[in-house]
Image (tube, helix red, strand yellow):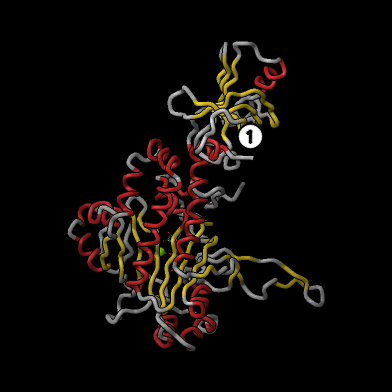
Amino acid sequence: MDLLKEALANPVFGAAWTARGWVRTKRDMKSVVFVEVNDGSCMANLQCTFNREAGLPTEIEAELAKAVTGAAVVVEGTLAESPAAGQVCELAAKTIRVIGEAGAGYPLQKKRHSLEFLREMSHLRARTNTFGAVARVRSSLAFAVHAFFKERGFQYVHTPVITASDAEGAGAMFRVSADIAGPDGEKRPFFGRNAYLTVSGQLEAETYAMALSRVYTFGPTFRAENSNTARHLAEFWMIEPEAAFFELRDNMALAEDFIKFLLGTALEECGDDLAFFDKRIRPGLIDTLSAVVSSKFTHIPYTDAVAELGKNAGRFVFKPSWGFDLQSEHETFLTEEVARGPVIVTDYPASIKAFYMKMNDDGKTVRAMDVLVPRLGEIIGGSEREADLEKLEKRMKSLGMDTNAYSWYLDLRRYGSAPHSGFGLGFERLIQYVTGMVNIRDVIPYPRAVGQAAP
Ligand code: 4AD
Ligand code: MG
């Protein structure tokens, strides 16, 4: 049972073929009926042509009448060269069976629906060109993530989803709870303490990096931030490599190679889907992605970035000022006007970064790195980690953290500590970047955000 993708890639004209999929459109004319069938394996539909010139059997006419947009069909025929523009191959159809009717109530009747409308239809939207393409790009890049790390000796570690530690020290965590019965039948908290959905697998990945040298995690992460923007989700997927004996410079090189590898894979494997995004969603997309693959990312320390922004302070609503996080208007300026491409900003003030980052000798900045890209801003956040026990404990205490709760994490610095670094790539931000989709809720099958948890 072949998928459409295979038949269309190397069509054997004259060969018998069976199409199984869903009707996208039907054009019913006097002498011919065209049924466009798609099975989601690729962007293209297969045009199934029913020739009526010599008359069609009544059973087939009856099935054709039911073969409306959205119906599931099985069509048998032979592959033939297509006279129509824009397609090489069609199916000279002999029989059709409607195995799942759709009818007039099928919500996706129009050729084009707005993304807002489709956001209310997350269970059906994968049947549209746009969301089918997003799903294929997502799948292709998920495989590419594993291929990239496998080639480079990184081992895949499954870090927990439920955790008692706040990896980012930011407190935006969802609590996880359930009651169980104690010995006297009284209700007890399942974990015996507060537990949460993880905001990052980093801390646990670090423990494995200090044993296996190079590891990565790739899983769902959760943030209970009240941010209703086009680039924040409450549940998103993150890829987090962590490598022992890597310093910031190595980490930056890894991140740059990683992004280029992923964009290169998309260009190679998802040509038709990207061509669609280029035409319908973001003109120039393919040229931009190709240019990034062969570019060199710009590197700029935070302090220099703030100075550069300061020269153009008049253009910003938030005046750039040392010690404050970069606002999205600043990120836009740096990527779109200063670098005209991806930028890696390093050495941020310690006060705006997480507790685990390695302190620089100036005592004010940390070995952080954010990779910013045009139109999205931050796509990667990472750092070299503080490997010195005393310095790390001091920093945690100054932030009011309970060092006892993190004693397992501090053990990495007590026993066989070594320089190590890592980063997190937000998978949905990557998919936004690659597809040109504007809203992050449109690049994950079932978006979870403030006020949205179903279906
Ligand atoms: O910068 P963040 O918070 O870094 C960490 O979590 C580190 N522990 C990573 C590490 O060093 N191992 O998040 C990393 C990336 C961001 O750059 C962004 O791409 C994505 O995760 N991200 C989100 N994506 C969607 N929705 C959100 N609410 C996101 N928050 C972060
Ligand atoms: Mg960040």
Residue 326 location, quadrant? bottom left
Q: Between 337 and 423, which is closer to the camera in this rendering? A: 423
How many numbered markers are drawn?
1
| Rendered view: 83 above or below 428 | above
Residue ranking furthest to the right: 184
Q: Residues within 10 Å of mark 1 (few under 14, many from 20)?
A: many
For the N terminus, the image quarter is top right
Mark 1 CB lies closer than 8 A to ligand 1: no
Taking the image as drawn, is residue 73 in sight? Answer: yes
The residue lying at 51 percent from left, 80 percent from top is: 211
Q: Position of residue 33 (x, y in %)?
A: 58, 18
The residue lying at 24 percent from left, 56 percent from top is: 339
| Rendered view: 405 above or below 42 | below
Residue tagged 1: 20
Residue ranking furthest to the left: 311
Q: Position of residue 356 (x, y in %)?
A: 42, 76
The residue lying at 49 percent from left, 65 percent from top is: 150
| Rendered view: 53 above or below 308 | above
Q: Position of residue 399 (x, y in %)?
A: 43, 78
Residue 103 location, quadrant? top right
Which secondary structure lies at badge 1? strand
| Rendered view: 385 above or below 429 | below
The amino acid marked with disc number 1 is: Arg
Q: Between 17 and 337, which is closer to the camera in this rendering? A: 17
Taking the image as drawn, is residue 36 in sight? Answer: no
Q: Position of residue 389 (x, y in %)?
A: 43, 86
Quarter of the render that holds ligand 1: bottom left
